[in-house]
Amino acid sequence: MILLSALDFSLPLKNPVIIFSLVLFIILFAPILFNRIKVPHIIGLIISGIIIGPYGFNLLLRDNSIVLFGTVGLLYIMFTAGLEIEMEEFKKTKFQSLVFGLVTFLLPMILGTLAAVYLLNFDMMQGILLGGMLSTHTLLAYPIVSKYGIAGIRAVTLTIGGTIVTDVLSLLALAFVTGMTKGDIGPEFWLRIVVGSILLGAIIFYVFPLIASWFFKKFADHISQYIFVLAMVFLGSFLAEVAGLEAIIGAFLSGLALNRFIPHVSALMNRIDFVGNAFFIPFFLISVGMLVDVSVLFNGWGAVRVAAVMIIVAVLSKYLAALFTQKTFRLSSDDRRLIFGLSTARVGATLAIVLVGYNIIIAETAAGEPIRLLSEDVLNGTILMILVTCTISSFAVEKAAQIIAHKNDNGQVHKESKEKILISLAYPETVVELVDLGLMLKPRKSDIPVYALHVTDDQQANGATPPQGKKIIEKAVKHAAATEDILFPITRHDINISHGIIYSIKEHEITDIIIGLHINSHDDFFGPTAQAIFTRITDTIYMYKPIQPFNTLKRMVVAVPPKAELEPGFRHWLSKLTNLAKEAGMSVTFYASRSTIRELEVQTNGSSVKITFNEFNNWDDFLMFKGELQTNDFFIVITSREGNISYGEYLEKLPYYMKTYFQNNSFIILYPKQLEQGFNMANIQQGDHSLLETLSGNTMSKVGSSLKSIFKKRTS
């Protein structure tokens, strides 16, 4: 008791240790308790804020520290929204985003202004400001969408884009009304907004990527990378405020600018999600709850009447906007419910607008009381509207996200995948890059196992795994764990390294093998180990030489030999490369013959990756790629084993070309899955599952013609 008496427990709490402990326990237990009663955890955190806030039990004040972390949480939501967008999908839906943004701004603006003037007896300026306040919305329920893994669907993408449009227009309406009230509207005002917006876009979309590319190439430390990303986000938010816009717009644009530098399956993305969902975003939700004053319901009908009008207009207008968007772009009813839920919550910009209006004093009463542009009834009504719209938003998004995620799962063919990926690790310097490649080759959230293999040469190690081998495997497993992926470690002793790799591939039935290019300058290009593997293994092999981190690569350039589409592993390596490009945020440019391009176009139709095709027939002019490749290009050459249908003598020069002319680019030499020498039914049964489909119709005739020409050459 004597010890406790030395502490100050008077309300509101002032001890920072007690305050922080209380908030952390709320963040921990509120989601657990509310999930038990089927209430979204977002609502649980907001209600917790009401209970502990100044209008509840007054345990905590909404002081500068709460406001600070709450602001960080709001910016974090907007940043992650920009970060998780599929950029190619976003570009495809930019028109739809613009239409939705205009509709979801105009409907609340018109209905809100009319309701304010004719139902609440406001003047026109007050009505426009109230309409602008109802037009804006906050992506409060976005973490729910992210949790269900549907952040990349069209409905979510166009809603996020529309959010920026409507928030910008709403804040311009605020600037217009406040300027008119103060008499500041003039050419200088509009010039500052236009010039500021152009400069903001130029800095974020042109300067930020240059800085990010330089930083990620120079610094590999994960902590430094996370701090750098956070600093860039808040710099972008500050620049938006300098331009006369809201900070949330700068945060979102920063997310778009950094999108391609942070792959969704990377350790950095995992850290960003973890810190945001565990700390900053819950702090924001609690701070929203602390604004709510439930007592206004019992202090007269003024605030209740204003709140009722605002809530009805706010919900109805956003529903009508979602319905219009659904009908216009032929979306499903679940998409409509999701759009409605995401665009219904009002917090950030709404709060900013009402506080600005409340603080503008336009006159005084005879008793000296200030007459505000927006009255106290509007302020209290706004707080109640925030509570109601956040509740509706959370329930609507939770329900819609569950249904859409369930349909997406059922829409996929659930069959046990036979794919297995093996990463052969020999050097500690390349562990991170090889593991990153292995993890990005598999589709997100798939159950394809990834193995990390280190082989010890028995003749050199005398039966014991050397310390370096253990460190290599430990480093690989640790790096994969940072992305919440499981890497299955394999350590093996064998008579030589190539023998150990080959038999590990056969024992575990591996379909994709990743091998790093050796670093011994005195050996030939592939080295004896890799050469033995190419000869003995007919599955897909990726010979990878990393020069720079994956997240700094912009474009994948793929050289495909003639008749590659006739090989049994064609579809397999194509799906792997498109998935790799999608995860790393790269565009893809294929160089191939006309017939190969036709098949590539068929197989990649509908892909979310930006893909272009260039006709290339003269492999004797392979050095033309030296002029085509840029610094941040990822060069991939599809080759072939001797004796197979896509093999040509020009491929024999490939090692010399790559060693001599392409040392400054990251590259992969890819051996596709091919038939073993000797064309028999046993080979066909062991081949790729799509082989029989490949060897049918027009394709079969091509194979026949090619085999005929081969036999003619051999008999002549």
Image: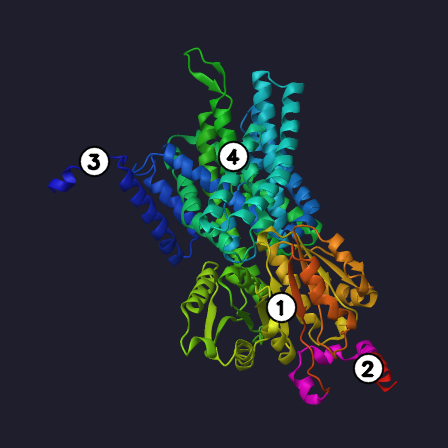
- Residue 139, percent across and down? 53, 44
What's the CA distance linking mark 3 and mark 1? 65 Å
Q: Nearer the viewer, residue 222 or 463?
A: 463
Judged left or right of residue 707, residue 244 is: left
Q: Residue at x 40, y 30 (%)?
A: 300
Mark 4 Cα within 10 Å, few/some/many (few <14, many 20+)? many
Quadrant in which residue 714 is drawn: bottom right
What's the CA distance linking mark 4 and mark 1? 52 Å
Q: Which residue is mark 4?
A: 350
Q: Was residue 38 drawn as part of the magenta stretch in this picture?
A: no
What's the CA distance linking mark 2 and mark 4? 71 Å
Element assignment for label 1 = strand
Mark 3 Cα within 10 Å, few/some/many (few <14, many 20+)? few
Q: Indicate whether 129 appears above or below 713.
A: above
Q: Which residue is mark 2?
A: 707
Q: Residue at x 22, y 35 (%)?
A: 10
Span shown in magenta: 680-703
Q: Indicate whether 555 appears above or below 534.
A: above
- Residue 435, percent across and down? 53, 63
Marks 4 and 2: in contact by CB < 8 Å?
no
- Residue 559, percent across and down? 74, 63
Element assignment for label 4 = helix
Q: Which mark is residue 542?
A: 1
- Between label 4 and label 1, give the one nearer the viewer: 1
Mark 1 Cα within 10 Å, few/some/many (few <14, many 20+)? many
Q: Which mark is residue 8?
A: 3
Q: Residue at x 36, y 32 (%)?
A: 63
Q: Earlier in the sequence, mark 3 or mark 2?
A: 3
- Between label 3 and label 1, give the one nearer the viewer: 1
Check disc 1 and give the amino acid type. Tyr
Q: Looking at the image, which residue sits at the far left?
A: 2
Q: Nearer the viewer, residue 320 or 616?
A: 616
